Amino acid sequence: MNSKRFSICIVGGGSTYTPDMMEMLCLVKKEFPLRKIVLYDIDEKRQKPIGEFGSILFQEYYSELDEYVFTCDKETAFTDIDFALVQIRQGGLEMRELDEKIPLKYGVIGQETCGPGGFAYGVRSVLGMIELIHDIRQYSKDAWILNYSNPAAIVAEATKRIFPDDYRILNICDMPISIMDIFAPLAGLKRTDVEPRYFGLNHFGWFTHLYNKETGKDVLPVLLDKLKNGHCDDELHYTDKNDDYWNFTFKHLEKMVQDYPYSLPNTYLQYYLYPNTMVNHIDPNYTRANEVIDGREKRVKEYCQSIIDLHAIRGTQYDLDKKYAQESHDGIEQATVAHNDAHATYIVELAMSIAYNRKDTFLLMVKNNGIVNNLDDGMMLEVACQVGNHGAEPFHVGDVPTFEKGLLEGQYAYEKLTVDATLEGSYQKALQALVVNRTVVDTDLARKILDDYISVNKDYFPKLK
Ligand code: NAD
Ligand code: G6P
Ligand code: MN
């Protein structure tokens, strides 16, 4: 039992990931005791059912909490917090749908974070995140800001520039960790049995080693061999657990490893290395945003409402105990086993590593500063870091090969130009950002996509001159 109790604010309280995160905090309350939980959102209506669900959950399962509120008031939300767990989507799923559909009209990748979609989301997100961090810092100057909000690579480039000395801002992505969760079993291991080495930009990187923590042996070659031979889904059964989008995406890793057999790529490289396959695969009239709106968003709303209705009728608890068999779980690892969504697990693990100075290894976005010798020192790399109460301490990588170096430099130019365009209000740099992105290339095409984005983002984009 740890004695210090912490205070957490979930920013983007109306996020589809919030209910799960709140349940996770209940499951780890012995290991990571809290005194206060706050939900904050700019959309009162969206946050309300999730907030009410939280009231019921914490009343039943977290009687030790001194305070729980859900609010749209910044001062209430950000005063006296130790951790802000940030998951905002500037413009909502409605704008995500347009981010994805506009480039597809022109036969170009339409995706949440990759290609032009990531550019449009990036412009919105950078402005929202900068304002948010200023607001948090006004009330809690030392709080840890653990950010999931996408496109994380572009957000990280912007936060590095605006808050250069603030080591308590950490940008994290769940994709590499999910890849480890799914593929480590090919070597007979769990994610937590291996120590990763990885380099790249967010949603644009490669695993180079996966060391067995017990023996020190690198098991990545075992995974690569199996992926090369195909049919990993038979062994892993991930097709049972995930939806078609993710089935296709994880299966696609086999093809990527067959073509580049020396490292394990991030799944998102499928958009950059196989743009033709991906454009043909995506339905331009029903994109991932539509799947999420009709799937996860709806399910989460219904889930929260069902608990609220049950509480109104019975005035008693729902079966969280039964759902996760909590009594038999007394640690985050066991809780994770019972828990469906990895997203909550990772960010809570990160908060705990900081809170207890555990120096566990996470893949985070940090300034290069010599981690990779042959890349720009200012680049916001995603690499393995030990994380404790001094922040992220990255592991050195050395030189990266020419193919990866070339891809990374192009992609980083795109990310920098996106942030420049946003902060300077520059149309020229926005156009350059899209042209340098390898999913677009052609200037006339880039201009058409950019002009369409400008016309639908009037409420969000700065004036681009
Ligand atoms: P969502 O639209 O369901 O939730 C986002 C919430 O943020 C909404 O309730 C919205 O009202 C709120 N919001 C928007 N702007 C805000 C602001 N400025 N301040 C406070 N609240 C604001 O989206 P979701 O699908 O649940 O995803 C949430 C975020 O997490 C997205 O940015 C998504 O890309 C990101 N995400 C990142 C990773 C990762 O690997 N880094 C993984 C999963 C999700
Ligand atoms: C992964 C990525 C996230 C991304 C999410 C999209 O977890 O790492 O950055 O936001 O997938 O999932 P969705 O179900 O919303 O398409
Ligand atoms: Mn991600």
Image: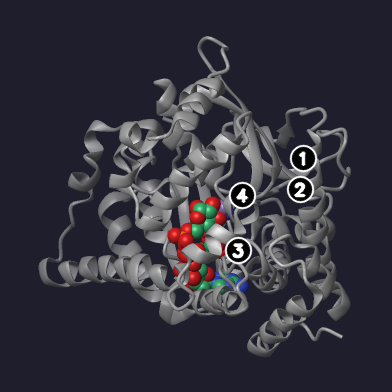
Q: Give how far apart the Cα atoms at labels 1 and 2 are.
A: 6 Å
Q: Which residue is mark 1?
A: 403
Counting residues from the start of the chain, the first of labels 4 and 2 encountered is 4
Indicate the amino acid at tag 2.
Leu
Q: Secondary structure at mark 2?
A: helix
Which residue is at a point 26% across and 70% down the rendered structure image? 302
Q: Which residue is mark 4?
A: 269
Counting residues from the start of the chain, the first of labels 3 and 1 encountered is 3
- Residue sitting nearer the eye, 445 or 61: 445
- Judge from the rendering whether residue 296 lies leftward or rightward of residue 203; answer left or right: left
Which residue is at a point 21% across and 39% down the rendered structure image? 325
Of tags 2 and 3, the one toward the viewer is 2
Q: Residues within 10 Å of mark 2 (few under 14, many from 20)?
A: some
Q: Which residue is mark 3?
A: 78
Q: Quadrant location of residue 96?
A: bottom right
For residue 407, the mark is 2
Residue 267 vs 441, above or below: the answer is above
